[in-house]
DNA sequence: GCCGATGATGCAATCCTTTGCAGGATTTGC
DNA sequence: GCAAATCCTGCAAAGGATTGCATCATCGGC
């Protein structure tokens, strides 16, 4: 059906080798010849057969991306970033979703590993040891998780939590609650650590409400505990949960931010649409995806420094309407 | 690195051909031999090299999926359905997103076509003619769009709109507004057609508010037109827009459903979480994805009946809190 | 106990591209 | 003007699996 390299070669009056070189290593072939080859290729609509190329080079030109749950608006943004960057580099992306099942991750990695040059694990929930083992056998990049000696892109949660605390403190809050995400999430651990440090430094009291599912319902479930704890402000693991908090607080007749200030993390699209609009720590999600691809391509080039590669992304406080002066009573 | 078919053959004391047959066509090889081969393969952790297989069979074992916008919660659900079904059939899925740019679709199809056995176009915005042309050169399945002579899976919008109208009529509504999605969307055309028929049959008046972007903001933008038209009820192109409507109506101090009833379409996860919770026409989104894969695999098997294949999925009214008795004034 | 049919297996070609090596042509240096 | 260096191109092997065809063994029928 499609043109092969031999046909292009015949059309251009050269050998297949020359065609191959002219197309993938232009500088080593004579300019005139190259021109002839390129034109012939264009005329015939030639595109190299990926399977044949992969067979000899051992590369597929594909990347894999595994996320916990596409239905969480955080991840589609990351996916978009990965897509965009991968396309620029002429890679295609396999996407998989684990439905928040940590035990599914390793299996997916192993299946996908055979069909890709490298994998991006976004917010993986599996234990460090397991991931480190997987990284031994496949080029692997972490996105939104930091694992020592595994290439990782992650957000500066410490600074993010510092900004959140500074904001709340400026509004007169003394007591803040934390509504955590899944126990298996690195972000939740990293963020609560940052929050502990920041509140301690600011002389504020931190109430940890525990771990909840990273869904709207998780926020709903956490709301009553938060209220009962008597804090004047609360930070949630992500925006979706913060929206759940908002919803339950409203149902209970509480005013936000009058009675309690609510902050999220992520800056998903919907968070600007709620009422009150959600104050949040904004994360550059597409950027996370793009950076992960960058790292992955880098370690594919130079596998020897895979253990060194790492990248930290900044966070940005975004003040909207769900935070306000602490109530005084 | 990984075991090849020759090593398995040596280990099992047979020829590579026999290994190949034992693994991919078990019934034509002697049971004892097969057993020996399978065990040897297992021992060596053998998995066929996909590139080599693809080179000779001309198949990649990959499918492609193109959606307009992953950030719209409708699509992640479809993606999940596609993933699940594809994995069952041992296919991997390439995902791409056009960012609602109709002109990007054809290009993506052409790029992806070379790397997959078949493509699923979900809710494509391109003109029929363009898609029909693409379908000539690549196995293609439409999801959520119906195109004559191109295999398609779609929802029974006519019946969905009939259910919506019956519901509103039962609540005493006489005038209903329609807030449309993108002009290029087949669904919006099909739904307004269904709505026209249903309202006419019920003796109700339909006000078409026009076309809006399929985002929250689109619903916000449409709200004032809807109010000005004096209807007592409104149906939006999708849930996200319906949520936008809800938001703007509330901001204007209107009561839903007291002043106006609001319905969406899709039944995205968030629509049960709004206040008031959104009445909607529920669509089986994962089902759409699964059915599309089914169709695609079927036409890969028997390309000759590609023009005949088609599947219609039912819709289901889901009554929640955003619809109520028509105001009487 | 022999012949034909049937079943199981191996041989070898094939898919298409890339790349190490060699050789021919041209240029450079002296 | 000749040897050496440089540049460009072609040859041929390799990569791993699949499959049409041929071969061989076995079995059943008579």
Image (cartoon, coloured by chain):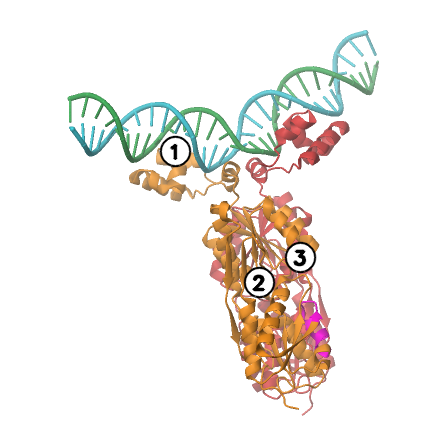
Chain colours: A red, B orange, C green, D cyan
In the rendered image, residues at marks 3 and 1 fall on the same chain: no
Chain of the residue on which disc 3 is drawn: A
Question: Marks 3 and 1: which is nearer the front?
Answer: 3
The residue indicated by pointer 1 is B10
Chain of the residue on which disc 2 is drawn: B
Q: Would residue B327 be seen by someone viewing this image from the given angle?
A: yes
Mark 3 touches mark 1? (CB < 8 Å): no
Measured from the top left, where is residue B116 in percent x and y? 56, 46
Q: Residues within 10 Å of mark 3 (few under 14, many from 20)?
A: many
Q: Nearer the viewer, residue A168 or C24?
A: C24
Residue at x 73%, y 81% (from the top left corner): B228
Total number of numbered discs in the rendering: 3
Measured from the top left, where is residue B292 in percent x and y? 52, 56
Name the magenta segment's main secondary structure. Answer: helix
Side of A269 where B306 appears, left or right = left
Quick one: SS at disc 1?
A: helix
Q: CA distance from mark 3 to mark 1?
A: 46 Å
The residue indicated by pointer 2 is B76
Measured from the top left, where is residue A217 in percent x and y? 54, 76
Magenta-highlighted residues? B210-224
Q: Magenta span has A215?
A: no
The residue indicated by pointer 3 is A81
């Amino acid at each position: 059906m499609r043109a092969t390299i031999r046909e292009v070669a015949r059309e251009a009056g050269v050998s297949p080798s020359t065609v191959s070189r002219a197309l993938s290593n232009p500088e080593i072939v004579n300019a005139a010849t190259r021109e002839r080859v390129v034109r012939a290729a264009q005329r015939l609509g030639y595109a190299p057969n990926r399977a044949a190329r992969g067979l000899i080079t051992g590369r597929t030109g594909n990347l894999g991306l595994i996320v916990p749950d596409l239905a969480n608006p955080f991840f589609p943004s990351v996916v978009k970033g990965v897509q965009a960057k991968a396309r620029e580099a002429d890679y295609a992306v396999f996407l998989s979703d684990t439905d928040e099942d940590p035990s599914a991750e390793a299996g997916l990695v192993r299946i996908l590993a055979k069909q890709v040059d490298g994998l991006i694990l976004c917010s993986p929930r599996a234990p460090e040891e397991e991931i480190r083992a997987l990284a031994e056998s496949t080029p692997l990049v972490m996105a939104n998780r930091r694992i020592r000696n595994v290439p990782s892109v992650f957000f500066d949660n410490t600074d993010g939590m510092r900004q959140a605390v500074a904001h709340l403190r400026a509004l007169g809050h003394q007591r803040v609650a934390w509504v955590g995400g899944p126990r298996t999430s690195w972000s939740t651990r990293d963020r609560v650590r940052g929050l502990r440090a920041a509140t301690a430094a600011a002389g504020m009291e931190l109430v940890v409400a525990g771990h909840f599912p990273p869904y709207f319902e998780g926020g709903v479930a956490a709301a009553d505990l938060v209220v009962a704890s008597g804090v004047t402000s609360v930070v949630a693991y992500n925006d979706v949960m913060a929206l759940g908090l908002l919803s339950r607080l409203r149902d209970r007749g509480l005013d936000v931010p009058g009675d309690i200030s609510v902050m999220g993390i992520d800056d998903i699209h919907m968070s600007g649409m709620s009422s009150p609009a959600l104050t949040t720590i904004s994360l550059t999600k597409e950027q996370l995806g793009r950076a992960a691809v960058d790292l992955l391509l880098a370690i594919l080039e130079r596998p020897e420094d895979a253990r060194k590669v790492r990248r930290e992304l900044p966070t940005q406080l975004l003040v909207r309407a769900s935070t306000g002066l602490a109530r005084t009573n």
